[in-house]
Image: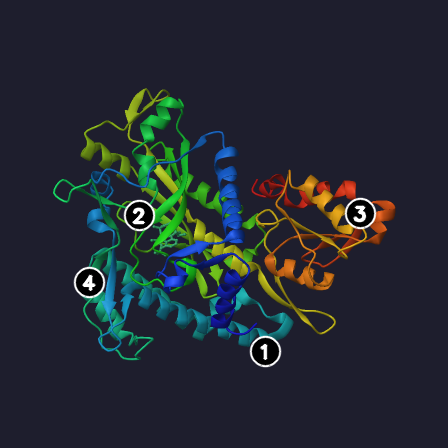
Amino acid sequence: MANQEDIFRKVISHAKEYGYVVQSSEIYDGLSAVYDYTQNGAELKKNIKEYWWKAMVQMHENIVGIDAAIFMHPTTWKASGHVDAFNDPLIDNKDSKKRYRADVLVEDHVAKIEAKIDKEVQKASKRFGESFDKTQFLTTNPRVLGYQEKAQSILKRLGRSLEAEDLEDVKNLIEELEIACPVSGSKNWTDVKQFNLMFGTKLGASAENATDLYLRPETAQGIFVNFLNVQKSGRLKIPFGIAQIGKAFRNEIVARQFIFRMREFEQMEMQFFIKPGTQIEWYEKWKELRMKWHLSLGMGEENYRFHDHEKLAHYADAATDIEFKFPFGFKELEGIHSRTDFDLGSHEKYSGKKLQYFDPELNQNYVPYVVETSIGVDRMFLAVFSNSLKEEELENGTTRIVLKLPAVLAPTKAAVLPLVKKDGLPEIAHKIIDDLKWDFNVVYDEKDAVGRRYRRQDAAGTPFCITVDHQTLEDETVTIRYRDTMEQKRIAIGAVNETIADEVGIRKWLKKTE
Ligand code: ATP
């Protein structure tokens, strides 16, 4: 495959062509940064959510799940800090009239410096061959060290100025780095301004009595306001967690990376309530557990990295991102935040209700501290989908497009194919489907030559093809073909269910998170 942009374009068109994702309201030319999941996408998304929910709720005795409303009392967002501080710094280019997030412009500039480091590594690795020691190179090569220092000092300064809300310095930084607008190429920038990302709406029939509401920008607050309801009704003891999956809405300034940055999206969040003073220990623990969850899907250890925050959000005392190598580079996939007692403490103040836990061991009340894990379903979808899409050169000189989705997440687990449309083969294929459908999503496909059908299923991400042929009539065996290796085996019809279950069963995959 060619360059990053080409790969990303292929990901987007494949998602549409194979029934995964399309732009919302496409017949009306679409709605910017809003997407619909079509038949296969809906299944993949559901499987991602299930994989997360089971790993978090089912596998942890002390984590429970809830489903809170999208609308919340407006004071919630005063208390959480979102009304005052949920802003992004925006900047306009005066020539192209395009709007950008000022911090993203700077971060993209840093990414270019990082790309130079990668290039140096590639060059040196070619030059030194087998004896190349990457770690040594990265820590001693003067040019690389120079780039690293430059990248770090830019990010530090950006972090400092954003934290101090020194927007003038953010603009100075953009000018000093001579960052140009990618569209007009000009460096003619406006001042940097803050922009609140929450969507407002109204509750009530008449305009005069309507209450201003917000569509929630994160699911976490639904957990905080229910903290005592859940703790008391479940008689939960600290440490314990509350998990939730649900929609969130943000009026993103720039949203042009497909489902990476959407205006309506879904989050999977877990707030872990702990004793004050134990937050660093739990923060480290959740970093480890969440990384294991990602690695269990087998998408390559080299595609993940932690990125600790320089600039901390208004609620956090430590924060890191799990970054994933998307087609456009390493970007945030999940956030892990030590949120202290900020949220519960603030809701106590604004609501006038006590939100405290009685610790029977200490014989005292306190407002618990919180460590949060927060991942976007859609970003996870993009990570899985883009990482799985491969173009392979085959021995016979042809190429095949294959979507190597982790089998546990694949929308359809098997396709059952009669070799020909006669001689009773379709009937047997339907009988096999009638048995498999109790356990798995399966499809029937009889159109075109069997080779073409295999390719179609490869591209759709189906891990198994089961082919019924004339030998099946004699000995009740079928051919099972594995998507990733293209290996074909003859097995008894009676063994098909178990063979599929062995590969797609969630138990086998979740075991790897242990
Ligand atoms: P970013 O810096 O990319 O804007 P964030 O730091 O604001 O993200 P959080 O508030 O930590 O993100 O949200 C937690 C998770 O929710 C993110 O890691 C991401 O996976 C997901 N997420 C956030 N904003 C969006 C969005 N606009 N579209 C899709 N997913 C999102």
Mark 4 vs mark 3, foreground winner is 3
Mark 2 vs mark 4, foreground winner is 2
Is 475 placed left or right of 76 in the picture? right
Q: Marks 1 and 3, Cα distance to the nearest angstrom?
A: 50 Å
Q: Nearer the viewer, residue 74 or 447?
A: 447
Secondary structure state at the residue bearing disc 2: loop
Q: Marks 2 and 1, Cα distance to the nearest angstrom?
A: 50 Å
Mark 1 vs mark 4, foreground winner is 4
Return the residue found at the far left.
Answer: 208
**Residue underneath mark 2:** 217
Residue at the image position 77 percent from the left and 57 percent from the top: 420
Residue at the image position 54 percent from the left and 77 percent from the top: 123
Question: Which of the marked residues, 1 or 3, is nearer the chain's N terminus?
Answer: 1
Secondary structure state at the residue bearing disc 4: strand
The amino acid at mark 2 is Pro
Tags 1 and 4 touching, CB below 8 Å: no
Secondary structure state at the residue bearing disc 1: helix
The amino acid at mark 1 is Arg
Question: Which of the marked residues, 1 or 4, is nearer the chain's N terminus?
Answer: 1
The amino acid at mark 4 is Lys
Question: Does 468 sit above or below residue 206?
Answer: below
For label 4, being within 8 Å of ligand 1 is answered no
Tell me where residue 87 sits by quadrant. bottom left
Mark 2 vs mark 3, foreground winner is 3
Residue 184 at what x, y percent from top left?
30, 79
Q: Marks 2 and 3, Cα distance to the nearest angstrom?
A: 51 Å
Q: Quadrant of the C terminus?
A: top right
The type of colouring in the image is rainbow
User: What number is the disc on residue 127?
Assistant: 1
Is 80 placed left or right of 457 in the picture? left
**Residue underneath mark 4:** 193
The amino acid at mark 3 is Ile
